[in-house]
Amino acid sequence: MTGAVQGWLPLPLALVLAAVLTPLLRFWLLRRNLVDLPGERRSHDVPTPRGGGLAIAVAIAVALVLAPVTVWWPGIVVLAVLALLGWCDDHFELPASVRLAVQAATAVLGLWWLGPVASVPMFGHDLHLPWLWTLLAGIAVVWLVNLHNFMDGSDGLAAMQGVWSGLAFAVILRMNGLDAVAAFALALAGGFAGFLLWNRPPARIFMGDVGSMALGGGVAMLALVGAVSGAVSVWVSLILTSLFVVDATATLARRVVRGEQWYTAHRQHAYQRLIVAGWNHGRVLALYAAINLLLVLPAACVAVVYPESGAVIAIGLVVLLAGGWWVIQSATTTENQGHE
């Protein structure tokens, strides 16, 4: 078996493991009555077991150990810590301060392990400000963990993003010779692909915080190693994650500006607006997947081939997606009155 083929093995291994482990975990969760009940702030109509992300985390870790590849331990450790945090939050409802403290600690651990972010390419020039970029990188790690948690509210949506992010980062990282990190990204994609078989609309199980925090942590570590090594610029990472970043960030900013309790449950994300307005989960999933394929993918390809244009492309894409977010917010205002 060639090294190139071996390098891709974490993907199918994690996919099969997650596909097999998820229904077993679902059976156990139902026996324990660990379910999410329908409610005013939720987007599902029937009681559904939560915590399925545990199967994803286990599948990723086991696949990397079984595959004949070098295990990228920084990613595994951070993913495991955040998965454990999410599992505890799913079942014990941890205070926000505890969640934030552990997330910040994992960001510090990742930066200590991988090293500081020395410079950021800016319009054809490398801006060397290690203290500033490293601080912002730590904040970005925490935000990526939380925004993936916020965006896990529609059947298959976060799992789809996990598949997309894992595959996209894996291709770019392998192009730059970071095979061990690329193997981690492939396992991430495989784990969420296997889970998506059970989480697609109508979802038979939810990933819960254990899955969404692990996803956010995994993506954050891939973006961090890319920035530290120079293999994936911060602009390319922003492009790859832009769909979730824009929806979550714009929604949070709007709530803060309006003086709302931004940290409480709500239904104001664009995908939530669409669901309340009458879209089904499958249609929402198709829309977000299409945006990744038709807008994000071409933008990422151009930014990789022409790195000096990365900042312009990333900013332009963010502005475009923010415009789409605003159109959805405006078009669904009437339908959503009384649901915020």
Image (tube, rainbow, N blue to C red):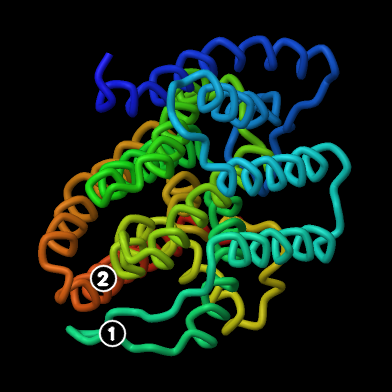
Relative to 189, is 146 on the left or the right? right
State the residue in front, 69 or 224: 69
Q: Amino acid at mark 2?
A: Ala
Residue 279 at least partly seen: no
Q: Nearer the viewer, residue 298 or 10?
A: 10
Mark 2 surroundings within 10 Å by alpha-carbon count, few (fewer than 14), some (14 through 19), many (20 or more) = many
Which of labels 2 and 1 is toward the front? 1
| Image position of 217 (left or right of 327) | right
Tell me: residue 121, above or below residue 163.
below
Q: Quadrant location of residue 8? A: top left
The circle drawn on residue 314 is: 2
Residue 240 to residue 47: above or below: below
Question: What residue lies at 14% left-to-right and 54% top-to-bottom?
Answer: 298
Residue 12 placement: quadrant:
top left
Q: Is residue 171 visible?
A: yes
> Residues at badges 2 and 1 in contact (C-beta under 8 Å)?
no
* Image quarter of the C terminus: bottom right
Dot placed on the residue nearer the N-terminal end, 2 or 1: 1
Q: Position of residue 305 (x, y in %)?
A: 11, 60
**Total number of numbered discs in the rendering:** 2
Q: CA distance from mark 2 to mark 1?
A: 16 Å
Q: Position of residue 328 (x, y in %)?
A: 36, 61
Residue type (three-letter) at the residue carrying disc 1: Asp
Residue 158, position in %: x, y? 48, 41
Q: Which residue is mark 1?
A: 126
Per the image, label 1 sits on a secondary structure element best described as strand
* Residue 137 vertical position relative to residue 85 in the rendered view, above or below: below
Which of these two is toward me, 272 or 147?
A: 147
Name the residue rendered at 18%, 60% in the picture.
Answer: 304
Q: Quadrant of the N terminus?
A: top left
Quick check: 284 left or right of 224? left
Numbered mark located on residue 105 in the image: none
